[in-house]
Image (tube, rainbow, N blue to C red):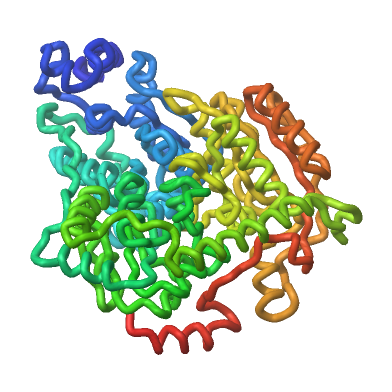
Amino acid sequence: MDDHVSDDRRFERAAAIVRNGGVTPALDSGDLPQQLVISVAEAVVIGLLAQDVRTFIGIFGHGSTDLGEVMRIYEAAGALRTHAVRNEVEAAHAATALRWSTGQKAAVFTSIGPGALQALSGSLAASSDGIGVWHIYADETTEAEGLNMQALPGGEQEQFLKVSALMGDAYSLHTPWALPEAMRRGLNTVDDPHRAGPFFLLLPINVQPQTFSFNLRTLPTAPPPPLGAAADGGRYDEAAKALLGGRRVIVKAGAGSLGASAEIEQLLELADGFLVTTPRATGVLPAHHPRNAGVGGSKGSISGNYAMENGDVLVLIGCRPVCQSDMSRTGYPNVTHVININTDLSSVTHYNHTTALRGDAAETLRLLNTRLEELGAAPAPLDSDWAKENADAMARWRAHATERYKNETLHDEVWGREVLTQPAAIHTVTTWARRNDAVTFFDAGDVQANGFQIVEDDRPGQTITETGASYMGFASSALLATGIADTPFFGVAMTGDGSFTMNPQVLIDGIQHDTHGVVVLLDNRRQGAISSLQRDQYGIDYATNDQVAVDYVAWAGAVSGVQALHGGHSVAELEAALERALEYGGLSLIHVPIYFGDNSLGGMGAFGRWNVGSRVHDTQSIRHRLDI
């Protein structure tokens, strides 16, 4: 090996980066030479470090041995940390959860072929939920010597580039000198301040070890700037007059609203409006705020859906037009005017009869609130007919929920005894988590659907609900973030038996990577969300359960270091198990038998429409009658 790519020289470069606190300071001090002859793989690693990507999660293969050798040396110098896991989907979820819950950047790495396809599948969560994560995949060689083992079949050029580009922005580093452009595109994607996503950097196997003369100053470091307030052009005046002319204002908050809590609260007071949240926006206002009607949509709340059904002016803030969130575009049957605040062009113009304000939510709302005040608006007391109607709907929802929390157990045919219900179990766990400042990750399915109706967050970030892709197995994989994070925290993975068995690797990887948290496994011996939907639509469920009993406590207990616990059959027993998990500090699993059946007290219920199954005709008929 030439001297310029020797292990010693690589170590010296990595050590210089560590000593100076980053790539740019090392270049400024002269400790790290600006012009180097290095391998492509090392240049990629330095490029990621220049963007403060120091955490790598994934699985090595024959397509990534050269990249792995660079990472080995740089980790020995303290420049980065590598976390090898047992499944690429798990790696994608862990990196997504890390960025989502802490802001810490990460890169997923895989080999070529099946591993990359697994990680690509897992990236659906980051893509759907707008979370910035680097994905570094090996790719077939550029020498066209024939089909590469594990490459996609067919023999066409850059097939994996085409596939990955369907999920997000992608770049194949066919030419080493294109690295600055590739890193710039990646930075623009993963650090987009409004709608981030995964970026896929493909490294051909034979390009990784190639050496080239490279100027490290060409590596990008500055993230893209945020947008400011939406341009005026008379739009603020139009929006303000529509709000003042409305009698029943509703404000729907999505993920893009999370930095605008104070401005949303002021808007609600000035317009006598009521807030409806998406699962991503829980905590944007405290759950018990008098103007927070709660979650709305196909699986919404009584109060959130009441506001949606009866509002006449709609303000959307940072919302994607998602089928379940807006009831397949039938959620606002009485709305005649929409005010849409979003940075995304497609989202901000989605509805008809819209005043589109394309810009940052908080800054745009400040100008809109100012215009409302200039037109004479003042904070409204909660004494209008609209306020009284919403207060009544909120009271009915609280009574509905409280009844289910108090009736904590029901007799279950499969378990042959009284067991906890989903509402009682989820309410117990999420209340406990808030009290102990733990972050709760929700998995897909019945647990998720009941969960976002139940959570009572006081601020954003207390619960993380992956509703963008509803990816089964996300929550358990997300727990890895608790130990990988620069500042560890305690996490709770709320998962069902179906979702857990999709990605159970956390039982092993969680110990390896010092996870701090607990998997709460609600076991109703079936795919409960779909069973319920089948029964509701057709009166019977089909192929969504099995007869295989699994001893999850024994399974978890078989892994050295995991504390395996029975959650019992009562709220008191579940709370005791949670306390044991917190005291343990490492990774625990609590198995909780859960009721499934037709008793309405066994779930939170559904109060909206959805364009699926037997409901398609009615839902589409409503949709086609609406103007917006």
Residue 278 drawn at (x, y percent): 45, 58
State whether residue 215 is above or below residue 170. above
- Going by the image, does 520 lie left or right of 109? right
Quarter that holds the N terminus: top left
Task: Tell me if residue 113 can be seen.
Answer: no
Question: 575 or 445, which is in the foreground?
Answer: 575
Q: Is residue 604 left or right of residue 466?
A: right
Please report the residue visible at 21 percent of the width from the left and 69 percent of the height from the top. Answer: 241
Residue 215 percent location from the top left of the image:
10, 28
In the displayed structure, would residue 212 be above or below residue 407? above
> On the rendered structure, is 481 left or right of 103?
right
| Count of numbered labels shown in the rendering | 0
Q: Position of residue 219 (x, y in %)?
A: 15, 33
User: Where is the C terminus found, in terms of image quarters?
Assistant: bottom left
Question: Could you tell me if residue 189 is visible in this image?
Answer: yes
Frontmost residue, 450 versus 415? 450
In the image, residue 184 lies at what x, y percent?
18, 42
Q: Nearer the viewer, residue 274 or 230?
A: 274
Q: Residue at x 78, y 56 (%)?
A: 595
Task: Name which residue lies at 52% across and 57% down.
Answer: 470
**Residue that sits furthest to the right in the current view:** 416
Please state which of residues 500 and 429 is positioned toward the viewer in this rendering.
429
Residue at image x 51%, y 48%?
A: 287
